Image (cartoon, rainbow, N blue to C red):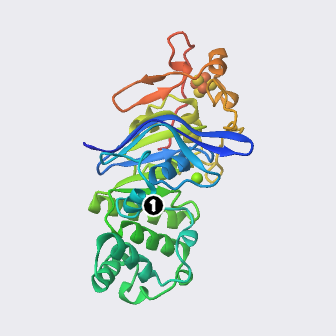
Amino acid sequence: MSKLLEIKDLYFSFDTFQGEVEAIRGINFEVNKGEVVALVGESGSGKSVTSQAIIGLNPMPPGRYKQGSINFDNKDLTSISEKEFQKIRGAEVSMIFQDPMTSLNPTMKIGTQITESLIKHQGMSKSEAKQRAIEMLGLVGIPNPDKLIYSYPHQFSGGMRQRVMIAIALACNPKLLIADEPTTALDVTIQAQIIELMKGLQDKLHTSIILITHDLGVVANIAQRVVIMYAGKIVEQGTLNEIFYESRHPYTWGLLESVPRLDSKEHGRLASIPGTPPQLIDPPKGCPFAERCEFAMKACIEEFPEETTLSSSHKVSCWLEDPAAPTVERPVQSGG
Ligand code: SF4
Ligand code: MG
C-alpha cells in the first residue's frame, strides 16, 4: 500500500497567557491510500489538534508547528502557505465535524453549499455543479435530492444534516477525509447508520479516512488501523485486531473496558477510567498515564517509555514492555 499521509515526530503547541500548551508531543503515524485509520483518545488527548494541524486550521489561541513534518502527497504541510492550504482544504483534504449545524451555513440552501466548492475547486459550471450536488445527496441517502437541494439546514434532522456534511466533504473527491467525532452528537441508531454510510462510501470511492473518536466501539466496524493517543502522545497503535485482541497498553485496556458490550448485563453502563489526563501546560516527564495506571512503577514516573515495536504495524510505549518489568495479566477482552 502506498502512503498518502506520513506524520513524523510532530510537535504542535499553543501559546496562551498561562504559557505554552504542548498539545502534540512527538507523534508518528501514517495513513495509506484507501485506508481508514481511527485516532482514539479522551478529550484533550490531542486527536482533534492533530487533525487541525493536518488541515491547517489552528484554533485560537494561535497554534504553531514546533518540530517534525506532515507529509501529504509529497508536500510538507507544516511549511506551506495559507494560500496553498486553501487549495488543499476541501479539495484534497476534507473534514466533517461533530455538529453539522456549526459547519453548515444556516442561511444558505444546502444545494448551494455543495455547488460552491465544486465551482471553486473543480472549475465546474453552475449546472454541472448542480447535477453533481444532486448525485452526491442521493449517494448519502437524502431522499428526493433534486427537490431537497433547495432546502435550508434547519429543515433537516441531525442525522440528515450529517449526511449533507458528508456529501459536501466528498463532493470534490478528496484524497483524505477527516471525520472528527462525526457521530457523537447523534443518537445510537443514527450513529450506526452514519458509520455504515461512511463505510459504504469508502468502499465505493476509496477515500482515505481519519476517524477521530473517544469511543473504541465506533471504530470496530470501519477502521483498519487504530492509533491511541493520550496527553499529546501516541501510546499504542496497531491493526484493528492487534488493538482489540492483543493490545499491550493499560490505557487501551481501559478504553476497551469502556466499550458497551451487547452480551453484558451492565449494558448501557460504561466502565470508565477513573481520573483525568494531565494538563499539557506542564506535562509530566514520565508516562502521562502514570497517575491513573494501576500498574505504574517508579520508572513510569521518571521517564517516558520508549516505543516497542511488536510487529510491523503494532507499536506500544509502556514500561511493562521492559524486560525488567513484572509480568501482568491483561484483562480478558470479550467485546470488540
Ligand atoms: Fe502504566 Fe507505566 Fe505503562 Fe504508563 S508506562 S501505562 S504508568 S505501566
Ligand atoms: Mg475533539
Q: Quadrant of residue 148?
A: bottom left
Seen as rendered, the residue at the extreme right is 18
Q: In which quarter of the image is residue 46?
A: top right
Seen in the picture, residue 8 relative to 101 is either above or below; the reply is: above
Seen in the picture, residue 185 relative to 252 is either above or below; the reply is: below
Residue 261 visible in rendering: no
Where's the N terminus, which quadrant?
top left
Q: Which of 282 and 334 is in front in this view?
A: 282
Tell me: is circle 1 under 8 Å from ligand 2: no
The amino acid beneath tag 1 is Met
Image spot of residue 137 (x, y percent): 37, 77
Q: Which residue is drawn at 45% across and 57% down?
A: 82
Q: Residues within 10 Å of mark 1 (few under 14, many from 20)?
A: many
Q: In which quarter of the image is ligand 1?
A: top right
Q: What element carries label 1?
A: strand
* Left or right, residue 285 beside residue 237: right
Image spot of residue 96 (x, y percent): 47, 62
Seen as rendered, the residue at the extreme top is 324
* Left or right, residue 107 beside residue 6: right
Q: Nearer the viewer, residue 214 or 71?
A: 71
Residue 333 visible in rendering: yes
* Left or right, residue 50 beside residue 291: left
User: How many labels were placed on the picture?
Assistant: 1
Image spot of residue 13 (x, y percent): 59, 41
Q: Which residue matches tag 1?
A: 95
Q: Residue at x 45, y 60 (%)?
A: 95
Image spot of residue 334 (x, y percent): 50, 39
Q: Nearer the viewer, residue 227 or 196?
A: 227
Q: Residue at x 60, y 44 (%)?
A: 258
